[in-house]
Image (cartoon, helix red, strand yellow):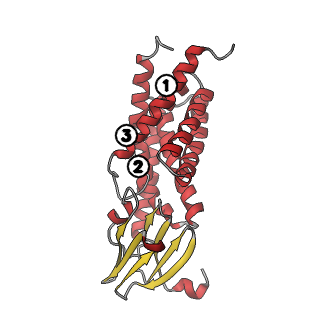
Amino acid sequence: MRFGVKKLCILSVSVALSMILSFVESQIPPLAAVPGVKIGLANVVTVFLLYSFGWREAGAVSLVRIFLSALLFGSFVSMLYSLSGAALSFVFMLIAKRIKCFSQIGVSVLGGVMHNVGQIICAVIILDTVTVTAYLPILLISGVIGGIVVGILGGIVGQRLEKLV
Amino acid sequence: MKKNDFVLVILILVIAFASLFVILFNRTPGALVHVSVGGREMGVYSLNEDAEYVLNGGTNILVIENGFAYMKSADCPDGTCVKTGRISYTGQRIVCLPNKVLVEIRGFGEEILGG
């Protein structure tokens, strides 16, 4: 069996954990008048899995988390935004990790920024207007800050759980 | 943290601030308030006529007053649209993502150009 029970448990707990982080973060009042400004705590799990396991594990857990979170707490539209952000963010994080010139924090920053870019693209399509791109400066900055925080936390989690993995 | 991380962060921040300045520098006072729901234009109102508009069957309420437009109330969970405050420049917008309501300010020119 390629996929052991231990791994199944770790990934399942990861899904639950990222859902909780996502939910807790949604309870914090908006940090700015711009939609989408957040730290992205749920991605601590994604970054941890990406480095401690691999892109398949990180990607699978992210997808499951997005679907379940949307099912429980969100809507179809919110899921579209999440998927757009996650898709773009994931592709860039994977490339960044592969070319090996960034540390975990750099990869996470790129992930955070591209997540917001993906959501803006989604908003442009859904709202049928290009003017929402005016939010880009603020979202780029919050993406960088969030990415650094998530990267550091993901690293700490990875260190602490080294023996487990 | 590697040196490349630093370069990446600086690069992104430079892009962010540069685009911010470009946007702020090119502000022009607006003329028309365009309201759209789910991408479909629902109405165009003058920024100079004080009025209160009920949007999207009541989920959002828009007020135009003294040359400013703002979302007076909304039933969305986050209330970002209401917190946006007053807008008056061309290109500024109030967005209510959950209700897919978009309030944009544009100039007169587009009506003539068909944009």
Looking at the image, is mark 2 or mark 1 nearer the viewer?
Answer: 1
- The chain carrying label 1 is A
Viewer-side label of 3, 2: 3
- The amino acid type of the residue labelled 3 equals Val
Which residue carries the number 2 mark? A141
Give the residue at mark 1: A13
Which residue carries the number 3 mark?
A24
Which of B108/B52 is in front? B52
Question: Where is B18 relative to B39, above or below?
Answer: above
- Residue at (40%, 80%) from the top-left corner? B53
A58 relative to B70, above or below: above
- On the same chain, marks 1 and 3? The answer is yes
**Which residue corresponds to the image point at 58% horizontal and 20% vertical from the top-left?**
A8
The image quarter in which residue B31 lies: bottom left
Residue B89 shows up from this direction: yes
Amino acid identity at mark 2: Ile
Q: How far across and down, in percent of the image, does residue B73 sit?
A: 34, 69
Is disc 2 placed on a helix, strand or loop? helix
Residue B114 percent location from the top left of the image: 61, 84
The answer to which of B104 and A27 lies nearer the viewer is A27
